[in-house]
Amino acid sequence: MQELSVQNIGTQQNRWGIKDVVTCVIFNIVIMIIMTTVSMGASMLFTPAVAYLAGPGIMALLCGPLYIVMAGKISRRGVLFACATISVLFFLAMGLINMLFLLGFGIIGELAMIGKDSYLNWKRNAVGYSIFFAGFALCAVLPLIFFKQKMIEIYSASYTQEAMNTMFYYYETPSMIAVMVLVTLAGSVLGCLIGDKFLNRHIKKAKLI
């Protein structure tokens, strides 16, 4: 009986409520706005090298604090996968079918979060979040590996040949891909660290969690 009670408590603690769903959606909308703004700003203000190699890392850095606060407020299994699902739906609505790969990274990231109170531990959050954003960075790389001809047809409708050549250089050169992923991982970890400090110094002290 005691074991059954403990299991029931655990199940209820991991069950999402309407408030959790609303919190997740609102935070992800803000995260998507930040990511879109950074993407547009980087392409206009920076060189292609900075835009392609550092863009995902900048997004991860800026969105990390929001993610940590959201994870702390919800603190239930499935937060990372829910973020991946919302992100994929957003990107699909924009016609970015290559972002379907992000769903797989969301599953891997969620598996990395298995364990008690993992969403209350910033280091565990940093692991899952880093997997998610590394996947985001690689969503432009993987389609060129598996469906290059199809992607060329899709890109041809929106990009000049020169722009496509530049894009393919960064997304098909192993050293460039490595730099992009490393910068993204660094941005992810730093963003989560900043988020954890903000969470402890301000959000928890204000008793918002």
Image (tube, helix red, strand yellow):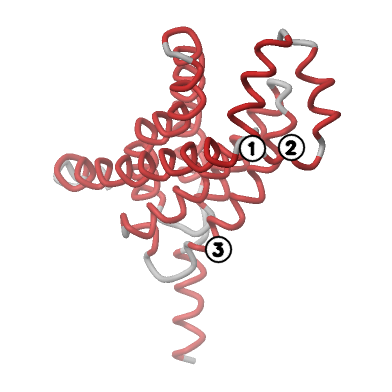
Question: Who comes first in sequence, dot 3 or dot 1?
Answer: 3
Verify CB contact (< 8 Å) between mark 3 and mark 2: no
State whether residue 8 is above or below residue 156. below
Q: Residue at x 41, y 50 (%)?
A: 74
Task: Find residue 139 and name its label.
Answer: 1
Q: Secondary structure at mark 1?
A: loop
Q: Amino acid at mark 2?
A: Pro
Q: Mark 2 falls on what kind of element?
A: helix
The local crowd at label 2, few if under 14, some if 14 to 19, many if 20 or more residues have their Cα within 10 Å, is some
Judge left or right: residue 199 versus residue 80: left
- Mark-to-mark CA distance, 3 and 2: 24 Å
| Residue type, mark 3 in image | Leu
List x then y, in percent, for residue 151: 79, 27
Q: Which residue lies under the disc numbered 3?
A: 111
Which residue is located at x 65 percent, y 37 percent? Answer: 141
Q: Is residue 23 left or right of residue 201?
A: right
Query: Can you identify the residue that label 2 sits on?
Result: 143
Q: Nearer the viewer, residue 49 or 103?
A: 49
